Amino acid sequence: MDGIYTLKNPVQEYAWGSKTAIADLIGDPSPSDTTQAELWMGAHPKAPSEVLLPDGAITLDRFIAADPPGVLGLETAKRFEGRLPFLFKVLAASKPLSIQAHPNLQQAREGFARENDAGIDIKAPERNYRDANHKPECICALTDFWAMNGFRDSGDMARQLNALCPRTLHELVAQTLPMNAAPDLRALFNALLSLDANTCRRVIDEALNTLEAQPNPEEVGRWVRALQNVYPYDIGVLSPAILNLVCLAPGQAMYLPAGQLHAYLEGVGIELMANSDNVLRGGLTPKHVDVPELMRVLNFETTTLDVLAPEAVSATEHVFQTKADEFELSVISTTPAQPHVNGQRDAVQLLLCTAGRATVSRADDSAKMTVQKGDCLLVKAAAPAFQIDGTATLHKAAVPEKS
């Protein structure tokens, strides 16, 4: 079908992944032999998708490079230097991911250049910056999705930490989260990350002993216990007392700007982000943790967590509004009585079918193709208008139209 192509997408196998979620989505044998953590749909050089053509397959980055304006759209190709500006993912977490944050654009460019100048191999485990891009992101839940996102209110943070560790952390909390003065979250977080192993063990043991007396702890206590089981005596075990805990219901989303500390804990979601793989970690991981660099990129303001509900742009499409320039995430829902009409637009789109089955056809009925759960389509810029008929749900990644 001219202008619309099927993509074959790589699966990333990380220890925290699921053996069923991604396999069930894309129709592979389930459970899988390995833990499948992320399905990548995009042109990131680490793992680009393949465009399935009549005469074979070509990686999406090469497909775009052959005709950036034709694939991306003239304005998108110009704005983003001939590159697909976003990375689309399915994320399946059966175990908690690391506490992390992502740099802003200037920090990413400087960090990438600095590590290149230092001769650090791009695949080295101690590498912080694997590209020169920032990584704002949006996560939309497909199942109940537990996460931590941003520093919680300082008064509540002090209450939580004092309740868990009234002896070992009392002095630190009093100094950094005073009742009648401005909080110093930077000092608090830096002190926690700098604890020696013995002190860290004493702090966490006190928290666990406190929770032993609470047979039905609130969610903070439940997640402290859960994190201790997966990452024993990592100071990140206390992060539920420091960060906002949230459980997104299916169909809800949240946005994570640069510098915002967060961690995904459990669940399956659709993730859309700027095309980057830059991560600064702060705990709950055996991987490299660079405390000074993390402290440099973090936003140390308390955060009121905004759960996003999609806004209708038509009877069949709902968009999650964010501040990102590189991407826009929307959900398309069709029924036999309510097809979706996708008008012509001079910008690239990716469509992932997450449920059901439908027919994609030209308005003049000159060409048709079938899409079903797990299929992913690339829609080139300026592809003719088309219609989606059937009972299906599709998540769409696109570049926002400039107002």
Image (cartoon, rainbow, N blue to C red):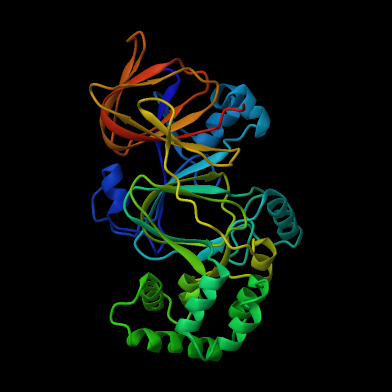
Q: Is residue 284 visible?
A: no
Camera-side residue of 41 and 156:
156
In this view, the residue in front, 164 or 104, is 164
Image coords of residue 239 (percent x, y): 49, 72
Q: Position of residue 270 (x, y in %)?
A: 41, 46
Q: Quadrant of the C terminus?
A: top right
Residue 348: image location, x then y, percent: 52, 28
370 relative to 104 in the view: left or right: left
Q: Is residue 38 above or below residue 7?
A: below
Identify which residue, 186 or 156, lies in the foreground.
156
- Vertical side of 229 occupied by 332: above or below: above
Q: Tell me where residue 76 sits by quadrant.
A: top right
- What residue is rendered at 63% in x and 31% in y? 82
Task: Note whether residue 229 is visible.
Answer: yes
Count of picture labels: 0
Q: Residue at x 63, y 80 (%)?
A: 191
Q: Compared to 48, does 171 lie above or below?
A: below
Position in image of residue 379 (x %, y %): 45, 26
Farthest residue to the front: give it.
Answer: 180
**Where is 141 relative to 72, above or below?**
below
The residue lying at 48 percent from left, 30 percent from top is 349
Quadrant where the N terminus sits is top left
